[in-house]
Amino acid sequence: MRYHFLNFEFNSTRLILTRDGEDIAIRHNEAKLLALMLSQSTHVFSKEEILDAIWQDKVVSEQAVFQNISHLRSLFGNEAIKTFSKRGYQWQLKTYSTDYQTNTVPNDSSVNKTLNSTVELNHKHNIPRYIATFACALLVLIGFMQLSTNKIEQNGTLHRIAYIPFSSSIANTQLTLEDTPRLDFTLLNSYNSDDFSTTAEQSYPSIKATHQIILSGQLRAYNNLFFLDFNLKGPFDEWQGQLSGNSLQDVDNKLIAHLQKPFIYSLIEQPQPPEIKQAALTIAHQSDPNDAIILHNLIASYIELNELDKAMVMTNKLILLGEHNQNPQQLGNAYLKQSEILTQSELSESSEEKLKLALVEFQKIADLKRQSDTLYAYSWLYHLRNDYPAIKQSLLSSANLALQANDKSRELDALTYLSVLASKHQQSEEKYQYLRQAEIKMRQYKLPLYYYAKIPFHYAIFAKSDAEKEPHLKQVLEFAALTPTHWVAQAAREQLLMLYIERNNLLKAQALVDDIKLDTAENSYLKALLAKAEAKPQQALDYAKRTFEQARLAGKINLSLDASLFLLTQHQNESVDYDFHRLYIKKHAPKYWISRHQATLSDHHIL
């Protein structure tokens, strides 16, 4: 049986899900659950019925049901499956089925009229039944052939990539990318990769009307080896990686081979919930287990979803791969990820050991950017020890390495982070000193205005009162007017809204929200906060549910957690699946998020 809903088609016999003719990754048990719910879409399935049907004699907890329901909702939207308190779950989306054996057709009025006319015509002319059956079979065959052709065309899609000349530390050296049957390259000479990577927040929107996928990169050479850092930016995400080879041609060949992988474009050209992205990466890794770039991105996906044990297993695989290839880049990346996992697990001593190993590997190949990242990571461990001199040394060294690598963003991140940590350690003069130093650098580099927004944003952090904080936050929004989705603008807007709400100045709060033009998860959350303050509970719930859906689709884990917590702390409402949101927080909340919201979580007995 084939089921059709939204722009999806699901084959319940083969358990294959497609969207617009392209296969979508779905786990086996999720597919079985989807088949069950679609087979009786009006039935409310209890947890026990689902456990019996999907897992049968296997002993699993009810949590397995919650997890699979959650994954299906992330695919099709939170409204696809409704929870009936103490009863179970029911499919909600309008669905029609096509059974090729019985030739069941969509319940569409135009199709019904066509079929009725055909039946009347057949009856009038007394066409033998076997001819009608043959005609139906022929239509099915044609449909199947068209579907097969669509799949072939999808797999052989020509990807159009605009590439910016790679920045190079090697004189008179540049990669020339030649078209292939699957890749169509267009050179953009009006940019250079260093400038684009620094200003992408502002530059990309002006390019994407004509070129949706932009490739940029940095080339360098060391000890007779050539190295490439590349970034493939799309409308919804970007794909990054590092490649090395014995010659420029070797690097060129590896880059072309890697860019021909079709799954990359599905990740960057359309929004993907984190679980779907992870499933696609898992399939890609299984197909090509020796691709270190795929494995590195899969590790990052596990960390994003707070699946730290799985992430650690995958980093061990990356270490084995790096040792086999004798590749310091891969080894350094693996150790740096292990440090990140151990830091999140509050195992700071073990984390520091991994940073030492990472630094050694990056020094072997003179990778200044990753050395800068490693020293940046050290600073948090020193913060936990309350060792400000070590913090200062590590972040100044990080900034200096970034300067040598001509990476302006990394350099400024290190300086502004040092300003923040100086404030945390009561270094009243130095917190302003390093912030001023960052501002001088911004002017020196002639960076876009949204970079300068970070300066008043930090002054707002240092402010001792709300009255002192407000003008700084307003200035942030002025500087970021052309880049309203930049994180610093979003953070300032939320802080300013909360400041107005706490003062009960709802007119200013409403004016701030009215000024919002874009329909994003962050903006939906602001509307939920304002509706709550205005005692409009239904509006607050509606906006919070929309926030959750948008954040899940955009892969913004922390914001989706905030939305879940918001829903759980409002008055009881039958439209909210409280079990689902409790489980979601339990499964996905990292320790730092739990620590930040500990009081609310405890008050409402959520964790």
Image: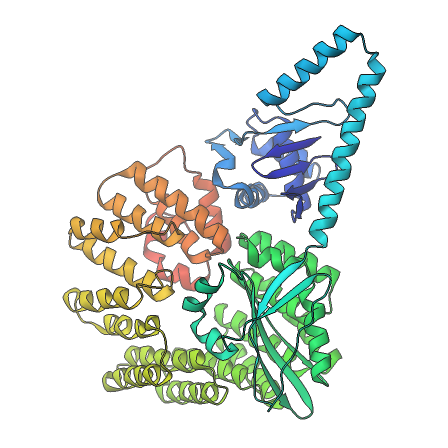
Q: Would you say residue 471 is visible in this rendering?
A: yes
Position above or below: 88 against 317: above
Nearer to me, 562 or 181:
181
Instruction: Indicate the position of residue 446 as horizontal and vertical percent values.
Output: 35, 81
- Which corner quadrant of the image does residue 146 belong to? top right
Tell me the residue at 28%/84% (across/down). Answer: 436
Nearer to me, 443 or 358:
443
Q: Would you say residue 381 is visible in this rendering?
A: no
Q: Seen in the image, is 540 located left or right of residue 127?
A: left
Instruction: Indicate the position of residue 5 as horizontal and vertical percent values.
Output: 58, 34
Q: Seen in the image, is 451 located left or right of residue 198?
A: left
Q: Seen in the image, is 155 located left or right of residue 80?
A: right
Nearer to me, 141 or 386:
141
Tell me the residue at 49%/75% (across/down). Answer: 191
Q: How many circles with numbers are drawn on the protein?
A: 0
Instruction: Indicate the position of residue 566 as horizontal and vertical percent values.
Output: 35, 47
Q: How is the image coloured?
A: rainbow
Nearer to me, 195 or 491:
195
Tell me the residue at 28%/68% (across/down). Answer: 479
Q: Seen in the image, is 431 located left or right of residue 12?
A: left
Tell me the residue at 31%/39% (across/down). Answer: 539
Residue at the bottom extreme?
223
